[in-house]
Image (spheres, grey):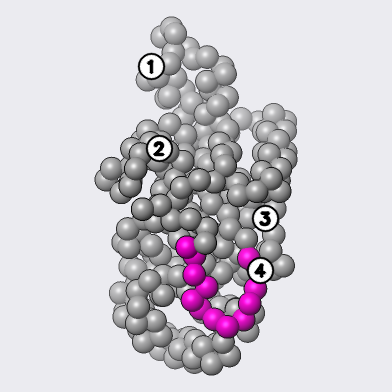
Amino acid sequence: MPVHNDDIEKKQGSQAVDTEILTLGMGCFWGPEALFGHLPGVLHTRTGYAGGTTPAPVYRQLGDHSETVEIEFNPSVITLEQLLELFWNHHNPSVINGYKGRQYQSLLFYRNEQQHHKMKQMQQMQQMKRTTAKTDEFSLQKDRSYTADSTEAGNAGTIDPAVLERRRLTEIQPYQAWYLAEARHQKYYLQRQHQLMERLYELYPDQNDLFHSTLAARLNGFSREYLTLAQIRQEIPDWPISETMQQRIDQWLTDQQNER
């Protein structure tokens, strides 16, 4: 079944905070979840499938859906503009669009007109940057490869410039249905830290609570060397969780630091 906005439970704590949600696609969802999950102000991340019409997609049967990441954040700490800047700076749509069908696609989903306006505005800024910059050689080679193999080409070695331009763009769509990915795709890099995962269950015996926690989002980023355990400890007081849970997490992180 699809997961909707109000299905996201604020299980972690007692401190109320106004949050926003950004859903995006930028290729394989493992890396982006770790990238965004390490940022102060990002509270929760999840991987899933969206953008298509196929009912009940799963990893091996995505149909016309794409891999996506859902990011819940506190806009008073990190803004939508900052997240979108990171989005465009860390992938190239022309490299991933059309690869593996629609499994990897540059996508943004807006939940309201404010998000829609900001996405379009920043997309136009990115296009202006691209027209004034030199063409990246790697992207050019990808485009040439696609041209040679494309069934959209009318003549050998040629392709409609409009088609090529679409491949360079990020699709911006209204948010509709979103499907949670399988557990093995949540916090992928953290799950490869087997000893760390075992110890995390001391704090979060329930796997769903663990994957939904801010701590898991940060440790997933830590597993990609985006930040240190000391940096995670510094921001715990800002997390919307109870003081008791803050103290437990701080002590738990201290123990992990001492053992390294």
For the residues labelled 1 and 2, the Cα–Cα distance comes to 23 Å
Quadrant occupied by the C terminus: bottom left
Q: Residue at x 27, y 45 (%)?
A: 60
For the residues labelled 2 and 4, the Cα–Cα distance comes to 31 Å
Q: Which mark is residue 18?
A: 4
- Which class describes the residues within 10 Å of circle 2: few (<14), some (14-19), or many (20+)? few
Q: Are marks 3 and 2 in contact (CB under 8 Å)?
A: no
From this view, report whether residue 138 is shown above or below residue 81. Answer: above
Q: Mark 4 or mark 3, which is nearer to you?
A: 4
Q: Residue at x 39, y 81 (%)?
A: 204
Callout 4: helix, strand or loop? loop
Task: Locate residue 178, reporting x and y percent.
Answer: 45, 50
Q: Mark 1 or mark 2, which is nearer to you?
A: 2
- Identify residue for label 1: 151
- Identify residue for label 2: 53
Residue 237 position by quadrant: bottom right
Q: Which mark is residue 80?
A: 3
